[in-house]
Amino acid sequence: MPSMSVSQAVAERQSIRAFRDDPVPGDVVADILDRAKAAPSGGNLQPWRVYAVAGQPLDTFKASMATAPPEEPEYDVYPPNLWDPFRSRRYQCGEDLYASIGVGREDRPGRLRQLAKNATFFGAPVALFFCLDRKLGPPQWADLGMYMQTVMLLAVERGLATCAQEFWARYPRTVGRFLNLPANCQLFSGMALGYADTDAAINNWRTRRDPLETWCEMRGF
């Protein structure tokens, strides 16, 4: 296995939105998911439930998404009437993303076409779905987020790329039917996994980060 520091993995991880179609071996996917179970969770509840899909089953699912009607989202990804600084950060992220592929703000069809690529996992050969019991609360959602981050960093270590996709919270019933989820199982997020297309313009920009002093107070140092 290639050697990489945690700092390197954190620095190299980014949301990839164009993948090569090279398959990822099942044993590599299983190893990443298994190693990620070392992620922390309150009381060691390990609330995550993960579904990994590839090959023909994934092709079938992506084809079904071409005619999937809108659904009531599982939850609101963002609070309504988002306020600053969060609103400005989200706005800037969108502007930078669409600028990378030459889609202007007034080009609504172009933006919708890019959004629709979520439904194909941006061409990734592996789809991951992350779920948890509906009776669990926000602390366990945070635990699931830590598990997902661990998966993403382990993927970087293996030369793979990811894109976490809360997009799938918009299609809980479609995904639920496909995965045959039990009624008590809530879909939290999906994730694209594969090899990045490094020539794709949309992968050659990085989201901006505010400096430490804007969100951190150091006391007693």
Image (cartoon, rainbow, N blue to C red):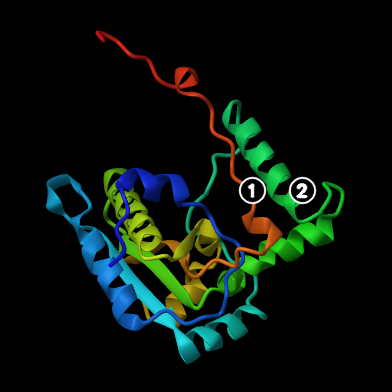
**From this viewpoint, which residue is outermost toward the bottom?**
56
CA gap between label 1 and label 2 equals 10 Å
* Discs 1/2, front: 1
Residue located beneath label 2 in the image = 99
Depicted 87 relative to depicted 53: above or below: above
The image quadrant where one finds the C terminus is: top left
Find residue 53 and report its image quarter: bottom left
Q: Residue 166: where, in percent of width, then height?
A: 50, 57
Q: Residue at x 40, y 20 (%)?
A: 216
Q: Residue at x 46, y 52 (%)?
A: 13
Residue type highlighted by circle 1: Trp
Residue type highlighted by circle 2: Ala
Residue located beneath label 1 in the image = 205
Q: Residue at x 62, y 57 (%)?
A: 203
Depicted 79 relative to depicted 156: above or below: above
The kind of secondary structure element at disc 1 is: loop
The image's mark for residue 141 is none
Q: Residue at x 53, y 83 (%)?
A: 61
Find residue 199 and report its image quarter: bottom right
Q: Do the numbered discs 1 and 2 sit on residues whose CB atoms are within 8 Å?
A: yes
Asked whether residue 111 is in view, the answer is yes
The image quadrant where one finds the N terminus is: bottom left
Q: Residue 130: where, in percent of width, then height?
A: 37, 64
Q: Nearer the viewer, residue 41 or 24?
A: 24
**From this viewpoint, which residue is outermost toward the top?**
220
Asked whether residue 183 is in view, the answer is no
Of the two numbered discs 1 and 2 on the same chain, state the one appearing first in sequence.
Answer: 2
Mark 1 closeness class: few <14, some 14–19, many ≥20 residues within 10 Å: some
Q: Nearer the viewer, residue 25 or 97?
A: 25
Q: Residue 154: where, in percent of width, then height?
A: 33, 59
